[in-house]
Amino acid sequence: MDKTTGTTSSGTPASDEELHADVCVVGGGPAGLALTLMLLRSGVRVTLLEKSARFDRAFRGEILQPGGQRILDDLGVLAAARAAGACELNGFQLVDRDRVLLDIDYRRLPAPYRHLLAMPQRHLLDALLERCRALPGFRFLDGHRIGALVEEDGRITGAVAHGPGSRRTVRARIVVGADGRFSKTRALAGIGAGRMEAFGHDVLWFKVRAPGRQTGYVRIHRTAGNPVLVHDSHPDQLQIGWTLPHRSWPELAARGVDEVRRELTAAVPQFADLIEESVSGLSDLSLLDVYAGKADAWTRDGLVLIGDSAHTHSPLGAQGINLALQDAAVLHPVLVAALRDGRVHQARFAPYLDARMPAVDAVMRMQQMQAKGMFGTGGPMADRLRSGVARLIRHSPLGRKITHRVAYGHPVVEVRTDLFTTGPTARAERTGGPKG
């Protein structure tokens, strides 16, 4: 017997339509769109729900690691996304005044992905969506929010979507929750977010126009106050992230934008003119509540969570999009096999959990170490320790191994292009790139 779990929209909808798909993906971010494209290329019918009607809203996560670039290249979308506008970055640097304490140089990696890529997320999403639209079996319900999950004898069998003046019930053999850190799909399934207060900082993000001021790096500036993250952003901009003690922003904001600007320009005086020009009000600033999260469960019968819906991370190390794309690539063959066999119960998704949970745990541990090393205090002794770590990373085989793991994950995730049955040639020619 069917039942719905969750809320319904008020009033009488203009229409109540029932749709059918093999997979219903909730959330049109990098994880949801990449998985949708992989499934469509494998002959799977996919209905994608996305609450926003357009991708031109502000996104803060825009740095692609080499591993994510490689996955997008396998899907044939990297070139198109880059052509819309992006910046290559040489790596990460930890800077104290004019002294570089730590330099993780991506130019030491094998070609062709020897850099980070700062790309407005809408360019990536537009490129993925364009490829999806060109394939059979795709239905895109933009401007539709999930209102309920459909259950049959304890198994998720679909989702109810509310759009402008309409309600649609999407019957699907599998529902994938890819709707972010505040996932409604996860909540409707009765799964806890697993929030952990693992970090002592939040990040206040904003962009400034900076023609001719790009640095070619992601830099963390250690200051007398709170560290500041800065990296190039397309077009001719810098994205700046000011780290603040956890939950301290309301008190600072109450003192007004002039005080906020004063503290910011004191922290990074080299960008004072850009901050004065670009930050005219508190609405120009966006606060990211930084925490770690690992959902209490990632699967139920007929349901899988991926990306931020399953695990949430700090922006340190630029791992968010990378992990989302890796989740999609690992889950893709698991779903294809489950659909082929007609078995979509929870145990069928175990290979996805076995592969991704250890990788996610490793990134969480790494980010906690990064936070202590880059944001922690300790005076001259701590600075000497950071310098020693910097020399290790720059000159030793262990340092190259660490850089490789940050860039590609461990193990390296590959797209199962051998499962593709439709669309263009599976894989573009490359000049190199790691295989393991």
Image (tube, rainbow, N blue to C red):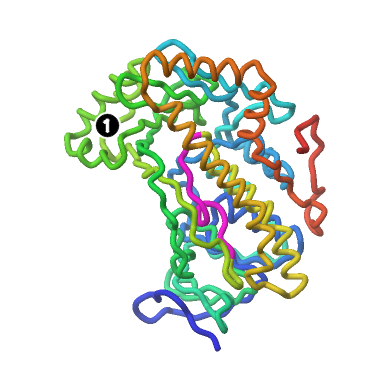
In the image, residue 110 above or below residue 165: above
In this view, the residue farthest toward the top is 98
Q: Quadrant of the C terminus?
A: top right
Residue 28: say if magenta.
no
**Which residue lies under the disc numbered 1?**
280
Question: Circle 1 — which element?
Answer: loop
Q: How many marks?
A: 1
Q: Magenta stretch?
A: 304-316
Q: Is residue 132 visible?
A: no
- The location of residue 376, given as percent across then percent down, is 39, 27
Towards the viewer: 236 or 97: 97
Amino acid type for the residue under numbered disc 1: Ser
Residue 409: image quadrant is top right
Query: Would you say residue 381 is visible in this rendering?
Result: yes
**Residue at the front extreme of this rendering:** 381
Please tell me which residue is depicted at 27% across the width and 31% down the height of the picture: 280
Q: Quadrant of the N terminus?
A: bottom right
Q: Residue at x 66, y 68 (%)?
A: 347
Query: What residue do we see at 41% from left, 26% from top?
Result: 209
Rendered view: 87 above or below 10: above
The residue drawn where x is 67% and y is 40% is 410
Q: Is residue 187 left or right of residue 338?
A: left
Which is more toward the observer, 145 or 108? 108
In the image: residue 393, left or right of residue 225: right
Q: Residues within 10 Å of mark 1 (few under 14, many from 20)?
A: few
Residue 175: x percent and y percent?
59, 68
Question: In the displayed structure, does residue 30 sit left or right of residue 429?
Answer: left
Residue reaching furthest left? 255
